[in-house]
Image (cartoon, rainbow, N blue to C red):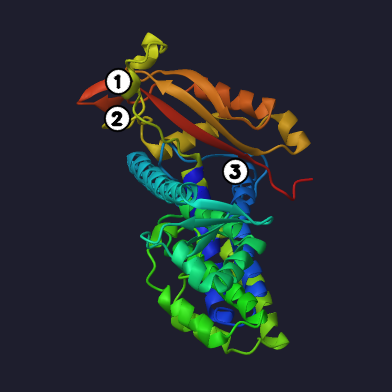
C-alpha cells in the first residue's frame, strides 16, 4: 500500500513542480509562490489516499451482470488476454523493491533527524536571551555557523551580533514571523515519502529560495541600506552548513537573491498563471487513473509483501504448523493447468450471490489460504472483505478448489501461503 501511495504522490508532485518551474519560478510574487508550493505538497500527499481508496473499493472494467474475475495472484497481474502480465515470481521482485524503498525512506528520515539533532545541539550550547517573540542564541566566534533561525530561536555568533546584529535579526525574525520552519517540516516529510524522486528535492530548494526572498523583502522594507545588506550576504555566503534544515542567511544562490531585490513586482496578469497549476495537477491525477497505470498501482497495493516465515521460526509464540508454511519459495504453487485454467474454473463454479446482486453490492474480496505440501487447499481466511454474502461465496469457492501443484523450496514440496483477490462486479446499467 505505501509503495503505491508513494508512486502516486510522486507523479502528482512532478506535474505540479514542472508547472511551477515553467510558469512561476523567478517571479517577484513571493507570498503567492510560497502558497502555491505548499498547495502542491498538500495535494501530492493527500490525493493518493483518496485515489487508492477508489482503486481498492471501486473496481473498474468491462460491463456485465454479476461478473466475477480474479485479481492479482501473489504478485502476478492478469493482462487483457487473460495471461499473466508478470511471472508468479514477480512477488519476490516486488518484495525486494519494497524493502529498498523502506530502507531508503528510513535512511532519509535518519539523515533529517540527525540534522535536527545538530540544530538542537547548537541551540542548547549557546547563550540564550529572551526577546518576547523569539529567543536569541549567541554561539562562540570559533563556530563557523552562518546565522539561522528555527522554531522560536535565532542563532548567530557573537561577532555577527556585534557587527551586523540589527540586519541579521530583521532577516531571521522575518523567517520566524512567516513560520517558514513549518514549511520545511512539510517539505522533508514529502522527501521521506519520495526520497527517490528528484522533483521532491528540487521543490524543497524552490521553497527555501522563496523563504529567503520573503526575508530579504522584509529587510529592504525597513529602510536598510541595500548595498550594506548585500555585502553582509556576500560575507556570510560561505558559512558552515550545520543548519541545512533551518532557514539560514546563506541559503539560496546569492546572484538570484540580488537580482530579485531589483526586480519589479509581478503584474496581476502574470499572477493569474498560478491558475494553470490546477489543470497541471489534475493531469498528474489523471495519469494515475489511466487503466493500465491504475491496474499496476492497484496490483502493487494488493500484493502481499512480507519476510519469509522461516526467518521468524524461532519465535516462541508461533504455532508449530505456521513454522512449516512458507511465504517466499523457490517455485510458487500453481493451479492445475496454470493461470488460464484457474480463471476458467472460478468462472465455471462461482455464483454471484443473489442478495448482493439485488442490493447492487460489488467489490474486491481478498482471501489468504494455505496450499499444503500435498496440494490441498486449507485455512481460507478473508484478508479484505466487501459484504457477508460476497465474503461467504469467496470462502466457499476456495474451500472447494481441487488440489494444486505445491510450492517448492530446494526441490522439495512445501506448504505455502497464497493470496487470491476475487472481483465481484455488476453492470452499472443493470435494471
Between disc 3 and disc 2, whose residue precedes? 3
Quarter of the picture holding the C terminus? top right
Q: Position of residue 237 (x, y in %)?
A: 41, 74
Q: Closer to the camera, 195 or 264?
A: 264
Distance between the Cα atoms at labels 3 and 2?
A: 27 Å
Residue 17 visible in the shown view? no
Q: In the image, is 70 to the left or to the right of 372?
A: right
Precedes in sequence: disc 2 or disc 1? 2
Q: Residue at x 41, y 40 (%)?
A: 75
Looking at this view, name the residue that lies furthest to the right: 431
What secondary structure is found at the residue carrying circle 3? helix
Answer few, some or many: residues within 10 Å of disc 1's Cα (few below 14, many 20 plus, some between 14 and 19). many
Give residue 414's mark: 1
Residue 201 visible? The answer is yes
Q: Which mark is residue 56?
A: 3
Q: Residue at x 36, y 18 (%)?
A: 372
Instruction: Please tell me which residue lies in front, 135 or 294.
Output: 135
Tell me which numbered mark, 1 or 3, is placed earlier along the sequence: 3
2 and 1 marks in contact (CB < 8 Å): yes
Q: Position of residue 168 (x, y in %)?
A: 55, 70
Query: Rounded to the nearest whole Å, what is the CA distance between mark 2 and mark 1?
Result: 9 Å
Mark 1 vs 3: CB contact within 8 A: no
Q: Secondary structure at mark 1?
A: strand
Q: Position of residue 147 (x, y in %)?
A: 48, 65
Foreground mark, 1 or 3?
A: 3
Mark 2 lies on residue: 329
Amino acid at each position: 500500500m505505501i509503495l503505491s501511495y508513494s508512486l502516486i504522490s510522486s507523479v502528482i508532485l512532478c506535474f505540479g513542480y514542472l508547472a511551477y518551474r515553467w510558469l512561476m519560478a523567478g517571479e517577484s510574487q513571493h507570498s503567492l509562490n510560497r502558497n502555491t508550493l505548499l498547495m502542491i505538497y498538500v495535494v501530492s500527499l493527500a490525493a493518493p489516499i483518496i485515489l487508492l481508496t477508489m482503486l481498492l473499493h471501486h473496481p473498474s472494467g468491462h460491463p456485465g451482470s454479476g461478473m466475477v474475475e480474479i485479481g492479482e495472484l501473489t504478485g502476478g497481474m492478469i493482462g487483457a488476454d487473460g495471461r499473466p502480465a508478470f511471472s508468479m515470481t514477480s512477488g519476490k521482485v516486488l518484495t525486494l523493491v519494497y524493502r529498498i524503498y523502506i530502507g531508503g525512506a528510513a535512511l532519509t528520515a535518519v539523515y533529517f533527524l540527525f540534522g535536527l539533532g545538530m540544530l538542537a545541539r547548537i541551540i542548547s550550547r549557546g547563550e540564550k536571551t529572551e526577546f518576547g517573540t523569539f529567543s536569541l542564541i549567541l554561539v562562540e566566534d570559533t563556530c563557523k555557523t552562518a546565522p539561522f533561525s528555527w522554531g522560536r530561536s535565532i542563532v548567530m555568533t557573537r561577532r555577527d551580533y556585534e557587527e551586523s546584529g540589527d540586519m541579521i535579526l530583521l532577516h531571521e525574525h522575518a523567517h520566524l514571523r512567516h513560520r517558514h520552519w513549518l514549511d520545511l517540516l512539510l517539505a522533508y516529510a514529502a522527501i521521506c515519502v519520495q526520497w527517490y524522486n528528484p522533483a521532491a528535492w528540487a521543490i524543497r530548494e524552490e521553497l527555501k529560495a522563496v523563504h529567503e526572498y520573503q526575508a530579504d523583502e522584509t529587510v529592504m522594507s525597513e529602510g536598510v541600506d541595500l548595498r550594506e545588506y548585500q555585502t553582509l550576504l556576500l560575507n556570510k555566503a560561505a558559512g558552515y552548513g550545520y543548519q541545512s534544515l533551518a532557514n539560514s542567511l546563506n541559503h539560496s544562490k546569492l546572484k538570484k537573491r540580488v537580482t530579485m531585490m531589483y526586480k519589479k513586482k509581478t503584474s496581476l496578469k502574470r499572477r493569474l498563471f498560478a491558475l494553470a497549476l490546477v489543470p497541471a495537477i489534475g493531469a498528474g491525477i489523471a495519469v494515475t487513473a489511466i487503466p493500465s497505470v491504475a491496474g499496476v498501482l492497484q496490483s502493487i497495493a494488493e500484493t502481499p509483501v512480507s519476510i519469509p516465515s522461516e526467518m521468524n521460526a524461532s519465535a516462541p509464540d508461533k504455532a508449530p504448523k505456521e513454522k512449516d508454511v512458507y511465504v517466499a519459495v523457490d517455485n510458487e504453487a500453481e493451479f492445475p493447468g496454470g493461470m488460464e485454467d484457474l480463471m476458467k474454473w472460478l468462472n465455471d463454479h462461482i455464483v454471484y450471490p443473489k442478495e448482493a446482486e439485488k442490493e447492487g453490492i460489488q467489490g474486491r474480496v481478498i482471501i489468504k489460504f494455505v496450499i499444503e505440501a500435498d496440494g490441498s487447499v486449507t485455512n481460507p481466511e478473508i484478508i479484505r472483505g466487501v459484504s457477508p454474502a460476497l465474503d461467504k461465496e469467496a470462502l466457499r469457492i476456495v474451500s472447494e478448489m481441487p488440489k494444486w501443484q505445491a510450492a517448492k523450496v530446494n526441490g522439495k514440496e512445501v506448504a505455502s501461503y497464497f493470496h487470491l483477490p476475487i472481483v465481484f462486479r455488476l453492470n452499472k446499467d443493470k435494471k
